[in-house]
Image (cartoon, grey):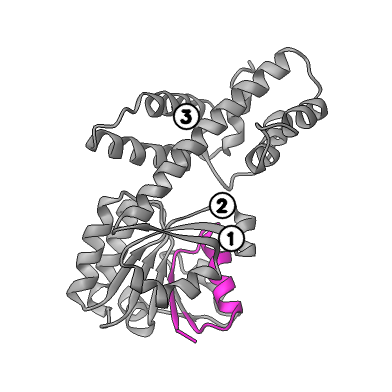
Amino acid sequence: METIGWVGLGNMGFPMAKRLLDSGHPMWAWARNPQQTLALKRLGAHVATDLIELAQRARVVVTMLRDTADVEEVYEGMRIGMQPGTLFMDMTTAAPAVARRTRAVTAQREAFFLDAPVTGSVSAATEGSLTCFVGGEPSLLETGGPILAKLANPVIHCGRDGAGYLMKLVNQTVLAGMFLGLADGLALARHDAFPPDVVLQAVGSGPAGGALFQTYALRMMAGSDDRSFTLGLLRKDLRLARAEAHENGVSCAMLDLMLERLGTAAERYGPHAGVHVLGRMDLP
């Protein structure tokens, strides 16, 4: 099986890397914080001393990072170690323009690149049921597709370089609208003193129901300690979406409104609060 290089062992990255390791892929891992690699090492992964060694050791390298700046920094850090024919796949939510720059870095070393961001929860990452949006040369999925399929179902090729990144921003824009609509709807239900179980049954049984409603409605009504998807992460994603809208002359009035609401919530609860706190913004 292909030797995998993995960079990025956060809430989502660790269970994703573990799935590939558990499926039999030899793995080399690297993280800024060496503590993050210890659990993976105990499971059988090798730990690279630096990004150069990681790029040298693996035939397929997967990165799952925090933001655009991290993608550029990590790929520049791997550049000298990149080997001809190696496939690099980035699963970060990043600015679409970074795909062209990162592809240029890999092409200089006769290597290949796909942008392949994912959407879904930590439990979906653990189960391999994320949704993956891929941008880049379709033929590269002959190598990358079987690996992505162990992490996500479905894996959807969206088009040219950067198309995966762009589709993720489309997804996040729609998702944010759903979060805010859910928060306002539940505030109205609370004002009218509907019991939570009645709201869950009534709304959850109709077209407004669905996976997101089932996951977040109770958290918004009853409270939760969950921080797997935070206000800060969603705000970061929407800022990328708004920048893309501005660049392409697309109306972003709703993005402006959603970012304003997220900013207010982050000031009140902190950017590391889970997005479910949007459902408490009407409370004193």
* Foreground residue among 139 and 73: 139
Tell me the crowding category of disc 3: few under 14, some 14 to 19, or many 20 or more residues within 10 angstroms, Cα based.
Answer: many
Residue lying at 39% horizontally and 29% vertically, measured from the top left: 255
- Could you tell me how far apart the alpha carbons at marks 3 and 1 are, in whole angstroms? 25 Å
Residue 253 falls inside the magenta stretch? no
Please tell me whether residue 258 is drawn above or below residue 275 in the rendered image. above
Residue range of the region highlighted in magenta in the rendering: 1-27
Label 3: element kind: helix
Please, is residue 148 above or below residue 109 in the view?
above
Residue 117 or residue 207, whichever sits in front: 207
**What residue do we see at 22% from left, 77% from top?**
80
- Going from the N terminus, do you reach mark 1 or mark 2 first? 2
Q: Are marks 3 and 1 in contact (CB under 8 Å)?
A: no
Look at mark 1 in the image and give the residue it sits on.
Answer: 125
The answer to whether mark 1 and mark 2 are in CB contact below 8 A is yes
Residue 219: x %, y % from top left: 69, 36
Q: Residues within 10 Å of mark 2 (few under 14, many from 20)?
A: some
- Element at badge 2? loop
Q: Amino acid at mark 2?
A: Gly
Q: Which residue is mark 2?
A: 120
Secondary structure type for disc 1 = helix
Q: Position of residue 193 (x, y in %)?
A: 78, 15
Q: Nearer the viewer, mark 3 or mark 1?
A: 1
In the rendered structure, which disc, 2 or 3, sits on the residue that comes first in sequence?
Answer: 2
Q: Percent x, y for residue 122?
A: 60, 55
At x 46% / y 41%, what residue is drawn?
Answer: 172
The residue tagged 3 is 262
Residue in view at x 35 percent, y 68 percent:
138
